[in-house]
Amino acid sequence: MATKHVKEMDALKEHLGKHQLKLTRQRELILSAFLRQEHITAEAMYHQLAKSDPHLGLATIYRTLNLFCDAGLAQARHFGSQTKYDNVSHKGHHDHLICTGCEKIVEFENEEIERLQEEVATRHGFTIKTHRLELYGLCTRCRD
Amino acid sequence: MATKHVKEMDALKEHLGKHQLKLTRQRELILSAFLRQEHITAEAMYHQLAKSDPHLGLATIYRTLNLFCDAGLAQARHFGSQTKYDNVSHKGHHDHLICTGCEKIVEFENEEIERLQEEVATRHGFTIKTHRLELYGLCTRCRD
DNA sequence: ATTGAAATTGATAAACTGTCTCAAAATTAT
DNA sequence: ATAATTTTGAGACAGTTTATCAATTTCAAT
C-alpha cells in the first residue's frame, strides 16, 4: 500500500495541510479502500472495512468520504435514497450510463456534450463549475 | 380555478379512471398548487398549503405528487437530500442550470445534446429511458 | 522521546426525508 | 340514499446522514 495511490495520497496530504487537518490511520485506510473501487456507498464501505477493522465507525466513513469530496478526490452522487461516492482522482470528469435493470454503471466522457453544455450556460449568463449527467435505461442484457 | 389547468386536470382524470382511483378535493387542490410553480418539494408545498388547509397531511402531499409522477404530470428529481417535483405537463423534457450562489434554477432544452446522449447510449448498448442533466455554476448576478 | 494543544474518533443520539398503518371520512356507482 | 371501495390524516416507523462528546490520537515544539 505504501507504493500505491501515491498521487492521491499526496493530494490528500496537501488538502489536510492547507486546512489544519491531520493524517490519521483511518483516513489512510479509507482512502486506500476508496481508491480500489469506482463507486461505493458509505454503508457498503463500512461493511467492507468492518471485516479487518470492526471498530471503524460509520460516522468516520461519512466524514472521511465528505472530506475526500472537499479535497477533490471524490464526488458524491445521489441515486434515489442512496449516496454513492465516485472516484474522480485518477480521471477527469465523467458521466454515467445507469442500467435500471441490473444497476450496472458505465462511465463515459464526451467532449462534444461538454462543449454544448458550456454553450448553453454562456447563453444564459452562467459560469459552470461542475455538472452531472446521468442516462437511465436498460443495458443489452436487461433488454431481454 | 375551474377554468385553469383544464388540460392537466383532464390528464389526471384520465389516469384516475384507468386505475380505479378517485378524484378528491385534496388531489384537485394539490394539482392546482403544483401547476402554479416550476419546482417544489413536498415539504414546501405542505407549508404552502397549510395556510389555507391546516389539516392537509404531509403524507397526502407525498402520495399525490407521486401519483402525478405516475400520471406523467410531474417528475421527481433528487437534488442532494431534497426531492423536487417538476412540472412536466406543459412542456417536454428539460434540463437545469442551477446557480450555486442564489439557488436559482433555469430550465433549458437542447436537441443536439439529447441526440449525442442517444449516440453515447447506443454505442454502449443501452436504451435510454430517461436522463438527468444538471449544470452547476454561478449566474450573472452571483458572479460579482 | 515527551508534552500539550488541537483535531479526530467511535458510539450513539438525533435529525431528516419519505413511507406505512389504520380507523375515520369521502367518493362513486348503483 | 346506500354500500363498496378508495382516500385521508395523524402519527408511528424506517433508512440515511449528521451532531454530540468524552476519550484517543496526531503533530509541532520542545
Image (cartoon, coloured by chain):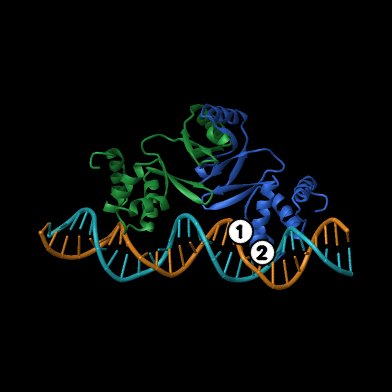
Chain colours: A green, B blue, C orange, D cyan
Instruction: Give the chain of mark 2.
Output: B
Amino acid type of the residue that numbered disc 2 sits on in the rendered structure: Gly
Q: Position of residue B19 (x, y in %)?
A: 74, 50
In screen coordinates, is A7 left or right of C2?
A: right
What is the number of the mark on residue B86? none
Q: Position of residue B94 (x, y in %)?
A: 63, 38
Question: Which numbered disc, 1 or 2, marks the residue that appears first in the sequence?
Answer: 1
In screen coordinates, is B54 left or right of A93?
A: right
Element class at badge 2: loop
Residue A103, placed above or below residue C20 = above
Which residue is found at the position 39% from the left and 34% from the top?
A91
Q: Is residue A9 visible?
A: yes
Estimate how packed mark 2 is, as few (under 14), some (14 to 19) or many (20 or more) residues with alpha carbons within 10 Å.
some
Mark 1 vs mark 2: in front: 2
Estimate how packed mark 1 is, as few (under 14), some (14 to 19) or many (20 or more) residues with alpha carbons within 10 Å.
some
Residue B94, placed above or below residue B86 = above
Which residue is found at the position 82% from the left and 53% from the top?
B2
- Residue at the disc numbered 1: B43
* Residue A117 sits in quarter: top right
Q: Position of residue D12 (x, y in %)?
A: 57, 70
Q: Position of residue B66 (x, y in %)?
A: 65, 52
Marks 1/2: CA–CA distance: 10 Å
Question: Pointer 1 and pointer 2: residues touching (CB < 8 Å)?
Answer: no
- Residue at the disc numbered 2: B57
Element class at badge 1: helix
Q: Is residue A129 visible?
A: no
Amino acid type of the residue that numbered disc 1 sits on in the rendered structure: Glu
